[in-house]
Image (tube, helix red, strand yellow):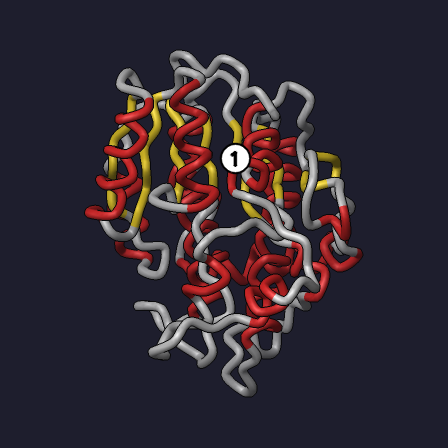
Amino acid sequence: MYVVPDQSGKLAIVTGANSGTGREAARRLAAAGAHVVMAVRTVAKGERARAEILAEQPDARLEVRRVDLADLASVREFADGIDTPVDLLVNNAGVMTPPSRFETTDGFELQFGSNYLGPFALTLRLLPRLLAAATPRVTTMSSGMASLGRIDFADLQHERRYSPMRAYGQSKLADLMFSRQLAKVAAERGWQLLSDAAHPGYTNTNLQAAGPSLGRERPGGLMSMLTRVGFLPSQEVEQGTEPLLYAATSPDAVAGGYYGPGGRFGLVGPTTTARPPRQALDEAASARLWAESERLTGVSLPAIVG
């Protein structure tokens, strides 16, 4: 099992920290000495997760703050409320394959808005706080489904034709491209900021059921069904969170790096360096996506960091 290095004196922000990989990341970062901000959409769920962790680790330094990544005003309010240097931002929260097309508060397709545009805006708004830390790091959760994604600049919001898997793949590919582009920007500007990404393989969390169940009375999800009947290997959250923790804390992680499980089909097993899909390596597309994301969110580098 991956042992998180000493995080004493560091402030870490983990989105989606009330359950799944986010909760496990918050738990293990706190166990390593970090002060962890559990950034969650529903405060009551965050407080329950905090209480559960404190029952195991009474000395853990945890606080719950609200952020809704599907609402850019909430993202701005959260970022404005952080007034100390941030050592680590873990962009973990997300939604997976709602059966129908839903929109965020700002009118974006739900997966593209929540999984990508919200974290993009949050990261850029927190940059002044990140760059005030000695060795800041931004780790973004992608997915193996990014390999099936395509950035459709003519229909980023899937208004013409909505496919749950295509929209999810696009959002997670966008996350990976953003992580790599942020690493490039940091290098160009001489920032001591490490940006990298991870994916959890196929980890048993509520993500696979919660998204497909939106608007339905019964749980759904193709991935969950395939796992139940034995077509896909899966792993528990303790193992599945390790690529994220490695990317977020390992001294061996590199800028622009991508980490995931090294076992069967890349879905389970110990952490290894993952191979980014070819489309994630398109620098022109990554730069275009960044520019379009600035336009859509109204958040840009020149206005925030000189």
Q: Residue at x 52, y 19 (%)?
A: 135
Can residue 112 be seen in this snapshot? no
In-image side of 105 versus 133 (left or right): left
Is the residue 109 above or below the residue 28 in the image?
below
Front residue of this view, candidates 38 and 231 = 231
Residue beneath label 1, please? Answer: 138
**Quadrant assignment, res 168:** bottom right
Q: Is label 1 in a helix, a strand or a loop?
A: strand
Is the residue 172 above or below the residue 183 in the image?
below
Q: Position of residue 230 (x, y in %)?
A: 67, 62
Q: Residue at x 38, y 46 (%)?
A: 19
Type of amino acid under label 1: Val
Q: Position of residue 205 (x, y in %)?
A: 47, 52
Residue sitting farthest toward the front: 229
Front residue of this view, candidates 39 and 47 = 47
Q: Position of residue 58 (x, y in %)?
A: 26, 19
Residue sitting farthest toward the bottom: 160
In-image side of 21 versus 104 (left or right): right
Q: Position of residue 142 (x, y in %)?
A: 59, 50
Can residue 4 be seen in this snapshot? yes
**Quadrant assignment, res 86:** top left
